[in-house]
Amino acid sequence: MQAKELSSDGDSPRLQGKVALVSDIGSAHGVAMVRRFVKAGALVAACPAGGEHRTGPAAALTEVPPEVVLLEGDVCAPGVAQRIVDAVADRFGRLDILVNHGAGGRFLGTILDVSREDFDAAITGDVWSVIALSAAAIPLMTRSGGGSIINITTIGRRGLDGRPLRATGGGALSALTVSMALDHGAAGIRVNALVLGPTQAVEPPTDPEELRALMSQFGGRTALGTMHTAEDVAAAALFLASDEARRITGARLTLDAGRSLSF
C-alpha cells in the first residue's frame, strides 16, 4: 500500500474534514483550541472540563465561533460522557480528535491536610474525566478509522511542594497517556499529552518590570524569560491533532517556556 503523502501547502486547512471534541470550553486555552481547529477546517463540538473547578484563566463563551456545537454536562457524572459522544455522533457521524482536560481543583497543603473528599474530587476531576470521555469516544473514533487523543496535564507531574493532589493527578495522567497509546494504537488512535505550566490568557507584557512582576507570581524564572499563552497551547494541540503528527504517539510534550527545566 502506498504511503499517504503529507500536504506541503502551508495555506491548506490542516484539519479539513475532521471532527473534534474539545473539553474545557470555559478556559482560555479551551476557547483558543476550538478557534484554531475551526480555522484549520475542522467541525468542532465542545463541552466543559470534567470536575467542579476551573483549570486556568477563564474565557467568555462569546469568544467561541458560532459554528461550534456546545454540549453541557460534567463528564465525571454517570452516563454524561457517553451522552456527549452520542451527540457528536448524531451531529457529525464520526470523531477524529478528542482533547481531554480535567478540572480536579488546585488543593494547597500537604498530605496531612488531605481528606478523602479532597482526594476523590481531585482524582475524579483530573483522571476519571479523561478515562470516562476517552472510553466513550474510542469506539466512535475506531469506527471513524482512527484519530488523535490529546490529554492536557501539568508539569507538576514530577512533584510539587504543597500540591500533592495536583502532582498525583498529573503523574497518573502522564502514565495513562502511554497506556492508552499502547492499547489503542492498533486501531489507528494516537494518544499524546500536552504538559503545561501556568498558562496566560494573553501575551505577557513586554515591559521588563511588568514581566518580572508577572513571572514572580509563578516562581520567577523560565529558560525563555517569558511565559506561554493559550494561543501557544492551541498551536501545539493543532500539531498533535493534525496528520503532521501521524507517527507520534505516547509523547508528553512540555509547554512551559522552559520553566520545568530547573525543577
Image (tube, grey):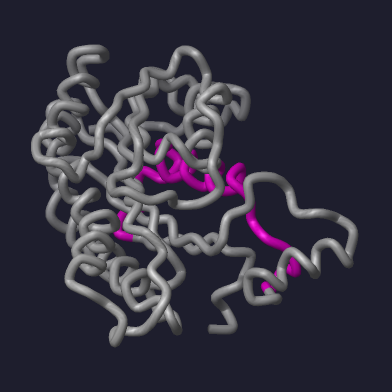
Q: Is residue 247 in view?
A: no
Residue drawn at (43%, 56%), measured in percent from left and top?
194
Q: Position of residue 74 (x, y in %)?
A: 25, 38
Q: In the image, is residue 112 above or below residue 80?
A: below
Quadrant of the rendered structure where residue 160 is?
bottom left
> How far across and down, in percent of the image, does residue 80 sit?
16, 33
Q: Is residue 133 above or below residue 69?
A: below
Reply yes or no: does residue 26 show up in magenta: no
Q: Is residue 199 left or right of residue 223?
A: left
Q: Nearer the viewer, residue 227 or 142?
A: 227
Is 123 left, or right, of 7 in this rendering?
Answer: left
- As for residue 241 lying within the magenta part, the answer is yes
* x 12%, y 54%: residue: 183
Q: Residue furthest bottom?
A: 112
Q: Which x, y percent locates residue 169?
A: 29, 67
Asked whether 112 or 211 is in front, the reply is 112
Which residue range is magenta in the image? 222-250
Would you say 228 lies left or right of 244 here?
right
Measured as percent of width and height from the top left, residue 234 is found at 53, 41
Vertical position of residue 110 compared to residue 118: above or below: below
- Residue 206 occupies which quadrant of the picture? bottom right
Q: Quadrant of the N terminus?
A: top left
